[in-house]
Image (cartoon, rainbow, N blue to C red):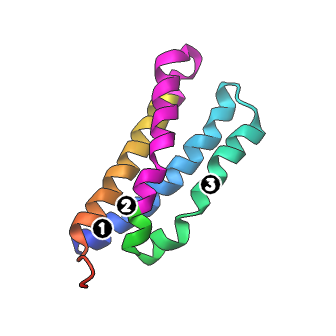
Amino acid sequence: MSVERNSRLLTIWLWSAVNLSLLAWITVGYPWPFCVLAALPLLAPLHGLVQGRRYTYTWATLFAIPYLMFALTELLVNPAARWVASVSLLLVFGWFCTMILFLRASPAPRE
């Protein structure tokens, strides 16, 4: 299999894991509406990620940054949520890196 296809599949798997990790914040005391509302915006890039559209991968990398910042902040500040924050941070960082890998492996459109 090609690097492009592998990175696209891994991106989809990590996208799913990031969504589940956001819902796991319920276990450390966050209200469930907050967790659901945090996971809903991640539905925006799903169609483009599945289709392998470079433009979607490009803006979805920027889309991941607030989730990285939230997980990092909670990891440093909230001792009760450190285990969930560390898992979320690793998953979001992995998702970010696989999107960059897809962009590097896929051919750029010719103008």
What segment carries the magenta color?
Answer: 59-84
Asked which secondary structure carries label 2, the reply is helix
Check if residue 76 falls in the magenta segment: yes
Dot 3 crowding, Cα within 10 Å, few <14, some 14–19, many 20+: few
The label shown at residue 41 is 3
Q: Mark 1 — residue?
A: 6
**Dots 1, 2 in contact, CB < 8 A:** yes
**Dots 1, 3 in contact, CB < 8 A:** no
Q: Position of residue 101 (x, y in %)?
A: 26, 60
* Side of 60 relative to 54 (left or right): right
The label shown at residue 53 is none
Q: Nearer the viewer, mark 3 or mark 2?
A: 3
Question: How would you classify the magenta stretch by its main secondary structure?
Answer: helix
* Side of 58 relative to 47 (left or right): left
How far apart, in angstroms, are the residues tagged by discs 3 and 2? 20 Å
Q: Tell me the amino acid under the disc marked 3.
A: Pro
Q: Mark 2 — residue?
A: 10
Placement of the N terminus among the 4 image quadrants:
bottom left
How far apart, in angstroms, are the residues tagged by discs 1 and 3? 24 Å
Task: Tell me what residue is drawn at x 40 percent, y 51 percent.
Answer: 95
Asked which secondary structure carries label 1, the reply is helix
Q: Nearer the viewer, mark 1 or mark 3?
A: 3
**Quadrant of residue 55 in the image?**
bottom left
Placement of the C terminus among the 4 image quadrants:
bottom left
Check if residue 9 falls in the magenta segment: no
Q: Tell me the amino acid under the disc marked 2.
A: Leu
Q: Tell me the amino acid under the disc marked 1.
A: Asn
Q: Position of residue 80 (x, y in %)?
A: 58, 17
99 vs 10, nearest the viewer:
99
